[in-house]
Image (tube, rainbow, N blue to C red):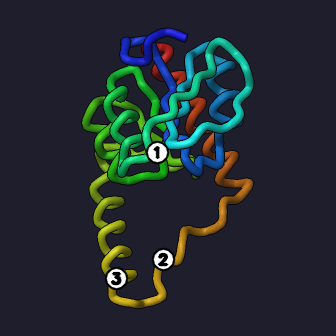
Amino acid sequence: MTDPSTDEPVLLVDADACPVKEECIRVALRYGVPVLFIANQGFRLERHPLIRQQVVGGGFDEADDRVAELSGPGKVVVTADILLADRCLKAGAEVTGPNGHPFTENTIGGAIAQRAIMNDLRGSGDQYGKGGPPFTKEDRSRFLQTLDLLVGRAVRN
């Protein structure tokens, strides 16, 4: 696999607890671009020259820091972490959540604000936000469409 820090389009996946690993592989192989799964623990992946995994230490935010470090123009990032999405957007990457909702410069501020409100509500002892809604077939389908669009755009540019 080529060096993901180059300008070549690369799919970077915040892989800890990512429910769409197979979809990421499918889209990356369709476009012939490298995909790098970054996680705190190793897991099984299909063997292919374009598919790679990088296991980082288990320290706080080590996987996030590595994803952000490799982000930039021409990169597509998959993460459910709103603060990581913000860092990657600022680096120039395209970013989507595993539910297929892309993070953009226009939407990230609202997502960060909503995250802060939910953290405050959880901290107050209210029963809000005991996890997100269940992952659905519609989420998976929307993710595939969004990822195809973002990777296609990265390849064309």
Asked whether the beta carbons under mark 1 and mark 2 sit within 8 Å of each other, the answer is no
Q: Which residue is mark 2?
A: 129
The quarter of the picture where residue 69 lies is top left
Amino acid type at image mark 3: Gly
Residue 123 has which mark? 3
**Mark 3 or 2, nearer chain start:** 3
**Mark 3 or 1, nearer chain start:** 1
Q: CA distance from mark 3 to mark 1?
A: 28 Å
Picture residue at 56% right of the left edge, 42% below the top: 41
Q: Position of residue 99 (x, y in %)?
A: 58, 52
Q: Position of residue 150 (x, y in %)?
A: 50, 30
Q: Which residue is mark 1?
A: 102
The quarter of the picture where residue 43 lies is top right
Question: 17 left or right of 82?
Answer: right
Q: Position of residue 88 (x, y in %)?
A: 33, 37
Q: CA distance from mark 1 to mark 2?
A: 21 Å
> In the rendered image of this protein, does residue 14 appear above or below residue 80?
above
Assign a secondary structure to mark 2. loop
Q: Position of residue 24 (x, y in %)?
A: 63, 33
Question: 51 left or right of 96?
Answer: right
Picture residue at 31% right of the left edge, 60% below the top: 112
Question: 148 left or right of 54?
Answer: right
Assign a secondary structure to mark 1. strand
Amino acid type at image mark 1: Pro
| Circle count | 3
Q: Nearer the viewer, residue 45 or 40?
A: 40
